[in-house]
Amino acid sequence: MTEPVQFSLFDPVPRAEAVSSPSLDADTYAQIPQRADVAIPAGTYADLAALNSHCQTCRRCALGATRTHVVVSRGNPKAKLMIIGEGPGQAEDESGRPFVGKAGQLLDKILASVNLDSEEDAYICNIVKCRPPGNRVPEPAEIAACLPYLLEQIRLVDPKIILLAGATAVRGLLQDPQAITKIRGQWLEWQGRWCMPIFHPAYLLRNNSREPGSPKWLTWQDIQTVRDRLRQLG
């Protein structure tokens, strides 16, 4: 299969010009983490360290007022596989790392089952970087405020495959309202990249059956498909 052409949204930006773009002066750049109405154009950040620095002081939505830690990412920023979840839970908020609670431990096991290491073979992040109170689903305004950071992460990491864990990740990135049960396991092309929706590990913790056709059984099929595509991509 021919690899899809990458769209201009994620075309590489010369590192020296990434922050000094004519469309983004120094004052505007400084306002990014404080105001949701200030845009974050593609190419804003020269590297992930600059993005992380802005995230640490972000108040673009109300979640910044209740968080313990900003949860930006874990894993390998040079990985071909990016995994995007919904948002931090309590364990993640306390540690500052995504997918480290029970759901994250299950995710690690799912990856390990096909000889993928979560720290070496994947870059892991979320749709929103601060914990919603009570682990509720992020609100549309919160997703909109945080999404530009995620788009910059995708540009900088440049993954070949994006694994979307759960319906919120699918809706947040792809703007696709379909139920996760309808589209999980399917390859979807987005901005020149291959995406696959899968069940969120937290959902699998609530559905323990491994019988054929069960969520865990289906996820096992999905992760093997992802592993095979990664091998095809070299």
Image (spheres, helix red, strand yellow):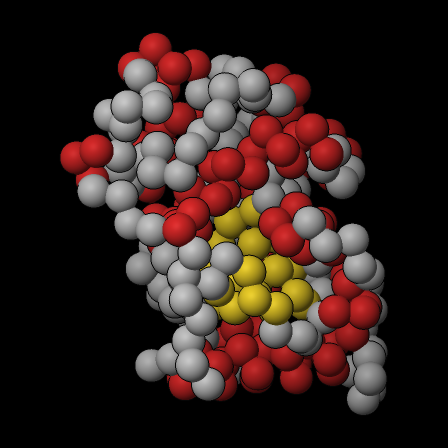
Q: Residue furthest left?
A: 16
Q: Position of residue 180 (x, y in %)?
A: 77, 63
The answer to whether residue 34 is above or below residue 156 is above
Q: Is residue 189 left or right of residue 53?
A: right
| The quarter of the displayed image where residue 152 is located | top left
Side (left or right) of 150 relative to 159: right
Task: Please tell me how many numbered marks the rendered image carries.
Answer: 0
Q: Residue furthest top?
A: 27
At x 42%, y 76%, the residue is 3
Q: Position of residue 195 (x, y in %)?
A: 57, 66
Front one among 13 and 70 = 13
Looking at the image, which is closer to me, 195 or 203? 195
Q: Nearer the viewer, residue 189 or 162?
A: 189
The residue sitting at 69% across, 49% down in the picture is 175
Viewport quadrant of the C terminus: bottom left
Write the residue at 50% across / 32% down.
70
Q: Is 123 rendered above or below residue 2?
A: above
Residue 39, image x and y in percent?
Answer: 49, 25
Query: Taking 119 as reference, is 52 above or below it?
Result: above
Q: Is residue 88 visible?
A: no
Residue 225 seen in the figure = yes
Say which residue appears at 59% left-offset and 29% top-offset. Answer: 145
Left or right placement of residue 116 versus residue 167 in this view: left
**Image spot of residue 81 (x, y percent):** 44, 66
Q: Is residue 66 left or right of residue 113?
A: right
Instruction: Pick the residue in front: 13 or 116.
Output: 13
Residue 66: name its quadrant. Answer: top right
Question: Looking at the picture, does residue 212 appear above or below residue 46?
Answer: below
